[in-house]
Image (spheres, rainbow, N blue to C red):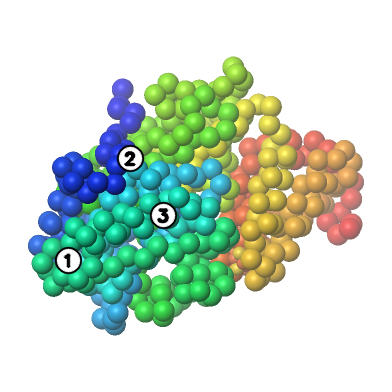
Amino acid sequence: MPKLELRLLTDSFSDSLLIEEYTKAGGFAALKKAVAMRSEDVIAEISKAKLLGRGGAAYPAGKKWEQLLRIEETPKYIVCNADEGEPGTFKDRLIMEKLPYKLLEGIIIAGFVFRAKAGYIYVRGEYRKIQKRLVEAIKNLHEAGYLGENILGTGYDFDINVISGAGAYVCGENSAVLNSTEGKVGRPRIKPPHLAEVGLFLKPTLVNNVESFANVPLIVNMGGDAYLEAGHPDSGGTKLVCLSGHCKNRGVFEIPLGKVSLRDAICNSELGGGMAEGKKLKFFHLGGQSGPIGSQAQLDTVYSYTDLRKAGLAVGSGAIVVMDESVSILEYLKEVTGFFIHESCGKCVPCREGNRQLLKYLQMLSMPGAATIGDLNTLRSLVRTMSDASFCGLGQTAATALNSAWKLFKSEFEANVRPDGGANER
Ligand SMILES: Cc1cc2nc3c(=O)[nH]c(=O)nc-3n(C[C@H](O)[C@H](O)[C@H](O)COP(=O)(O)O)c2cc1C
Ligand code: SF4
């Protein structure tokens, strides 16, 4: 039986902001090690570790860092994406609350690697207390010589600023984070140019998620090979998963990638603990509202980026929303679509109008005889158009849940449909 939990991050959770406590527990050993290394060598460890971005898109962190290092233009900026807007996701908040120095250490290491001018943490607007806590932690680091001028006597100057979001989900998209940080409307930018070339203030920029940065000191300390070993051969280390919904135990759990199945995550007593109130599991929704839905039959899939992808699922942000047999899939999807209607920034038609149309068809499918087979076909083609033609990831993934649920619960979609009527009837 594999070890279900592997505590690389969560083991050092603390409520204290005392720097001495953090250093006593091994804090800043990685920073001290990194400042004595060449930038290429720090990045080589991250590449060996196969750290995949923990914000949702799973882009290899080593590759992103290599790309930025190759760019000669200066100044460079480091941006930490702490928007955490994906429903069902609440793990970055825990890192910022319980492990702020680990996150800040990861950002300072990145700053040093790129000799960046400054760092920014873009924090979800609702996390007011956390923003204050980070500001206090940053002040403490200045006093202790880990931030500010001549960090650790290296001659390198670096500072970190906390920026507050204002509650828009789309502002978590990496280019929208930058626009919002610059004080502009938080809408996504067209890419390319990529952010490594034209990022914050149009300068080369690294954007990584909170959990990604918090893993950097671990990798520098353990070495890339040991970190890889702790996880899956394609993606090292652990993942913080957020269990919510109808499982017995809800909260954040740290699991080793590739060594635990979805069944373990949801049902094992050390993790999700199985279904509450003795009901049966109907489906689970992975990676947030923009992620795919899975069913009972996929429970034995190993929780790794590779295995989940092969099964048509995804790690995404790490959210696992568990739903029992009492939940109607159409009702659930209406809620998901309502979220995207609310959060669409309105810049492009496939997302702005597409989400409203999705909801209209889902409502028709819920009413006996209101929808035809033709409507169902129109819904299916709408899903394809939105995913192909939307400007940013929000619209491209807004119908992912619907698309995966369609394959699993076709009979529920068809239950109320009239057999007559063509695609262009209405
Ligand atoms: C609509 C939308 C919202 C997003 N929200 C977040 C978020 O809240 N936090 C986050 O880290 N990444 C979010 N992302 C992903 C970011 O664009 C980006 O991939 C990530 O910050 C990169 O960091 P990583 O490589 O360390 O994961 C979002 C993407 C989209 C399309
Ligand atoms: S897909 Fe288009 S409308 Fe939707 S959030 Fe992105 S840019 Fe805005």
**Residue sitting at 42 percent across and 27 percent down?**
271
Disc 1 residue: CB within 8 Å of ligand 1: no
The residue that label 1 is drawn on is 151
Q: Earlier in the sequence, mark 2 or mark 3?
A: 2
Judge the density around disc 3: few (<14), some (14-19), many (≥20) Cα neighbours within 10 Å: few
| Label 1 to label 3: alpha-carbon separation | 23 Å
Q: Earlier in the sequence, mark 1 or mark 3?
A: 3
Please determine whether, in this image, residue 255 is positioned above or below residue 364: above
Left or right of 83 in this view: 246: right
Viewer-side residue, 110 vs 308? 110
Please determine whether, in this image, residue 377 is positioned above or below residue 412: below
Q: Disc 1 vs disc 3: which is toward the camera?
A: 3
**Residue sitting at 33 percent across and 40 percent down?**
15
Q: Earlier in the sequence, mark 2 or mark 1?
A: 2
Q: Amino acid at mark 1?
A: Ile
Quarter in which the N terminus is drawn: top left
Mark 1–mark 3 CB contact (< 8 Å): no
Q: Residue furthest top?
A: 278
The residue that label 2 is drawn on is 15
The residue that label 3 is drawn on is 132
Q: Quadrant of the rendered structure where residue 389 is?
A: bottom right
